[in-house]
Image (cartoon, rainbow, N blue to C red):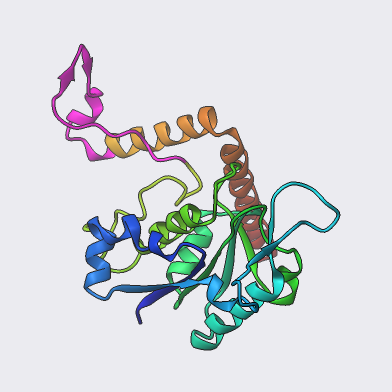
Amino acid sequence: MTFAATVLTLYPEMFPGPLGVSLAGRALREGTWAMDAVQIRDFAIDRHKTVDDTPAGGGAGMVLRVDVLAKAIDHAREAHPGRPVIAMTPRGKPLTQERVRELAEGPGVILLCGRFEGFDERIFEGRDVEEVSVGDIVLSGGECAALMLLDACIRLLPGVMGAASSGHEESFENGLLEYPHYTRPAEWEGRVIPEVLRSGDHGKIAEWRKRRSEDDTRLRRPDLWERHIGVRVQSASGAQREVQDD
């Protein structure tokens, strides 16, 4: 089964963009994944191809029309049933590696890219659209966020990355940040590679990497660390209850 993406956008020329080069580009050419970019303006209902209007209640900017968006989504869903429809918006649920892995294991996605002030809110309930955010930032449009989501999915597809284990020893895969990496030269401007990494003792190396992963997460991302500790405590409690029940 080929992972496939349909991107609903006002700027289809932005795709595949950076996804057409490097590993993702090679996988695209080899048919490991596929994509099509659909112009939202093609679904406008007037002769001027209008896709937006002024905000109800007043205010700056323009809002994408719900009737136009609905037609575009209906078209994509009819052509690709079974794919989730995801809108890239800062008001959405933060994207996680867990959700990326779920999407990568499925048939693909339909991505809705906003512009201007965003979407008419009624589209989310009227068409069962999942709202996703790639960070607490505001972009000019959803296209860059869509590229980010697709890149995260594509690199997890079988055969895309060189080493089969590459996708499992990275930040967020186990709820922690990844340990730091080093390579030659052994010394650079007085800074040396940690001795343990040059020791050849794989047990000590694994222990060092685990400790650094935990330390860096605790210091740099206390929110992730608290979540990680909570999961570990919950898992341990669950295991203890199972033993007691037996």
Residue 176 x, y percent position in the rendering: 48, 42
Give the camera-side residue of 55 and 8: 55
Q: Is 220 one of the magenta-colored residues? A: no
Q: Residue at x 25, y 23 (%)?
A: 194
User: Image quadrant for the C terminus?
Assistant: bottom right
Answer above or below: position of 90 versus 28.
Answer: above
Left or right: where 222 falls relative to 18:
right
Visible in this render: residue 161?
no
Residue at the top extreme of this rendering: 190
Q: Residue at x 43, y 65 (%)?
A: 12
Q: Residue at x 54, y 53 (%)?
A: 141
Answer above or below: position of 207 versus 56.
Answer: above
Residue 208 x, y percent position in the rendering: 34, 32
Left or right: where 89 falls relative to 146:
right
Answer above or below: position of 13 versus 6.
Answer: above
Left or right: where 202 falls relative to 48:
left
Q: Residue at x 22, y 24 (%)?
A: 193
- Classified by dominant secondary structure, the portion drawn in magenta counts as loop
Residue 223 x, y percent position in the rendering: 61, 38
User: Image quadrant for the N terminus?
Assistant: bottom left
Residue range (magenta): 177-203
Residue 53, quarter of picture: bottom right
Give the camera-side residue of 161 and 212: 161
Give the camera-side residue of 123 and 217: 123
